[in-house]
């Protein structure tokens, strides 16, 4: 057991920064610095606890698929109306969530390499594993542009890992799969379709997602280097 590592995850750093500084982390330098200080402090605490208990505690970007939804729901229940100003997503639909781990807001309109650079500043503090998502939507970037992006990430940022995440629509009638999230099958026109994309680290069918994750999916800013803006509501309704 002395070789075991105990992982500590975090959810909602971005919203915590907003409560304390008035801004989300991508909106102001102070808010971003505040976020870095919180994680640096958590890292120190983890090191102290490791020494004190002779156990190995490290920070990790845990997937927290349900926690980011659950925390937001609990805060809405016990801390309304204030929580309503802070939680992300769509309150009317009940699709609310907190931004996971140390990520910048999903809907922040930021150049992808800038997101990779800024989120990467947290990565040296997180020993258990960290990454930045690049949401591609339906675009198919060329191998050259992907290679160029990876090279830039390696040379100019501290980012540990990046994940390029496309989206697909799969048809329950003809069993074919097309790029992008669509309300009907691109091949046979059937409306009996499901979306597939990365929920956190892995790909799943959107029909299995909780409401918080659906809210996040609607918010995801598809990165403009490989261009496409937010998927419109109609497209994502296939999932609801
Ligand atoms: Zn079809």
Image (cartoon, grey):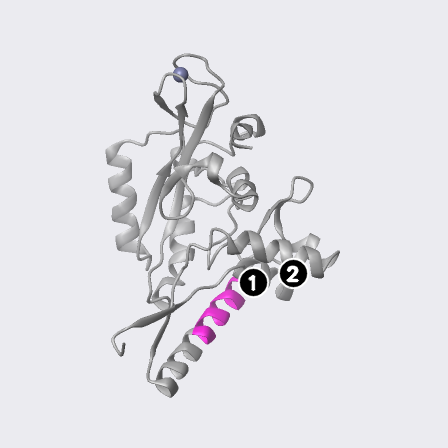
Q: Is residue 176 above or below residue 58?
A: above
Q: Is residue 141 above or below residue 27?
A: above
Q: Which residue range is magenta in the image?
A: 30-42
Q: Is residue 3 above or below residue 88?
A: below
Q: Residues within 10 Å of mark 1 (few under 14, many from 20)?
A: many
Q: Is residue 90 on the magenta stretch?
A: no
**Residue 24 found in image quarter:** bottom right
Where residue 174 sits in the image (x, y, percent)?
A: 37, 16
Residue that badge 1 annotates: 31
Assess whether mark 2 and mark 1 are in contact (beta carbons under 8 angstroms). Answer: yes
Label 2 crowd (10 A; few <14 / some 14-19 / many >=20) = some
Could you tell me which residue is drawn at 56 percent across and 62 percent down?
31
Which residue occupies 40% across, 83% down?
A: 48
Residue at coordinates 37% horizontally, 66% vertically from top-left? 126
Query: Could you say where residue 60 lies in the image, as x and y percent from the top left?
Result: 38, 64
- Between the residue at mark 1 and the residue at mark 2, the CA separation in whole angstroms equals 8 Å
Q: Dot 2 corresponds to which residue? A: 22
């Amino acid at each position: 057991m002395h070789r075991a590592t105990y992982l500590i995850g975090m959810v909602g750093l971005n919203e915590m920064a907003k409560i304390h500084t008035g801004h989300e982390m991508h909106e102001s330098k102070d808010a971003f610095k505040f976020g870095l200080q919180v994680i640096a402090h958590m890292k120190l605490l983890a090191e102290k606890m490791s020494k004190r208990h002779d156990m190995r505690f490290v920070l990790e970007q845990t997937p927290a698929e349900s926690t980011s939804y659950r925390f937001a729901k609990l805060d809405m229940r016990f801390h309304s109306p204030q929580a309503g100003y802070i939680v992300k997503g769509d309150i009317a639909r009940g699709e609310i969530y907190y931004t996971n781990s140390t990520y910048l807001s999903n809907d922040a309109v930021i150049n992808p390499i800038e997101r990779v650079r800024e989120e990467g500043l947290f990565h040296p503090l997180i020993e258990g594993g960290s990454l930045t998502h690049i949401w591609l939507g339906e675009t198919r970037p060329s191998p050259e542009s992907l290679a160029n992006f990876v090279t830039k990430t390696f040379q100019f940022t501290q980012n540990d890992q990046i994940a390029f995440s496309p989206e697909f629509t799969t048809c329950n009638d003809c069993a074919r799969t097309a790029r992008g999230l669509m309300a009907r099958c691109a091949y046979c026109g059937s409306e009996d379709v499901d979306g597939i994309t990365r929920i956190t680290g892995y790909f799943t069918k959107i029909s299995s997602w909780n409401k918080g994750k659906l809210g996040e999916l609607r918010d995801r800013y598809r990165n403009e280097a490989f261009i496409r803006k937010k998927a419109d509501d109609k497209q994502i309704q296939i999932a609801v």
